[in-house]
Amino acid sequence: MRLGEFKGFAGAALALVAVLVLLASLPSPAVAQTRLAAADKTAPVENTPSTAQEPESPNAPGIPSDATTVTLDVPARPVALLSGDSDWANGFKSIIGAIEKVDAAVKTAGLTPTGRPFAVFLSTDDNNFHFEAMAPIAEKPEGKTELTDGVKLGVSPSGKAIKFLHRGSYDDIDSTYDLITAFLDEKGLEAKNLFVEEYLTDTKDSGDASLEADIYVFLK
């Protein structure tokens, strides 16, 4: 599941665990069963550092040997964005399609991209999810709130978050969310039902094993 109410993303095992700087701002969720639903049941966060930290131990219980974790204060950034809805089966295709529209609108408007695209998951259930595809830009043009094809201008999510790295196909991302949920549970951290996936590699194939993505989980 995904942190708040995430669809049961079942998949192969992947490397995971933690650091965020949401787009230098990307948001927090409910991870593994409707992708992080279990996380909402954990204890409140206490003394979570606001700057990046080294992993406690690469072999800590419940954490893969190649995982790293970092807690960050993610700043809001200007973005071009497009809202969308999808079922989980077609989720990656829907996200990539929305990102392509955002990128095209940014290019047409002559705006300057400043980072990798990402998806902000705003609500999820067992079957569907609502999201916003975002592309960070240098600055919002004055007097404009919208570009072409329904693409709007806004800001990315901000706040305290942990960033987790997913390596492997998107079809297997559920395995990473399972690990995230276990990590949050173990650390007694409480997540918001809001999370971000920042795509570090260019791929349109959900089965592409070369995919790398940062998952930002925002904390309460």
Image: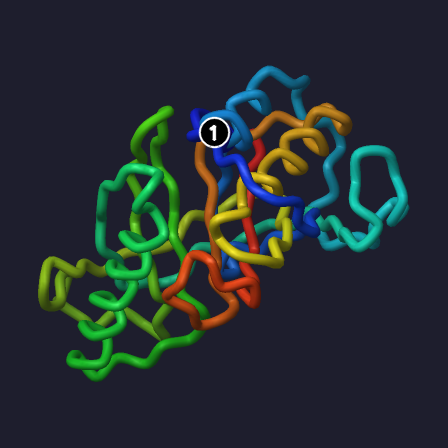
Please name whichever residue, 52 or 164, is drawn nearer the observer in this view of the structure. Answer: 164
Is 101 on the left-hand or right-hand side of 186?
left
Is 199 on the left-hand or right-hand side of 93?
right
Name the spot of residue 66 as percent of width and height, x first.
80, 55
Please name whichever residue, 205 or 115, is drawn nearer the observer in this view of the structure. Answer: 205
- Residue ID at (61%, 25%): 190
Mark 1 surroundings: few (<14), some (14-19) or many (≥20) residues within 10 A = many
- Quadrant of the image containing the C terminus: top right
Which of the colour schemes (rainbow, by chain, secondary structure, one colour) is used? rainbow
- Residue ID at (61%, 52%): 20
Position above or below: 44 against 51: above
Position above or below: 171 against 111: above
- Residue ID at (33%, 41%): 89
Q: Residue furthest left?
A: 149
Residue located beneath label 1 in the image:
8
- Residue ID at (30%, 32%): 128
Position above or below: 115 against 213: below
Q: Residue furthest bottom?
A: 110
Name the spot of residue 163 as percent of width and height, x first.
62, 50
Is 84 on the left-hand or right-hand side of 192?
left
Is 16 on the left-hand or right-hand side of 54?
left
Name the spot of residue 182 as percent of width and height, x first.
70, 29
Judging from the image, what secondary structure is the residue with disc 1 in? Answer: loop
Q: Amino acid at mark 1?
A: Gly
The answer, for residue 26, to whether it is visible in the render is: no
Name the spot of residue 82 as percent of width and height, x first.
22, 55
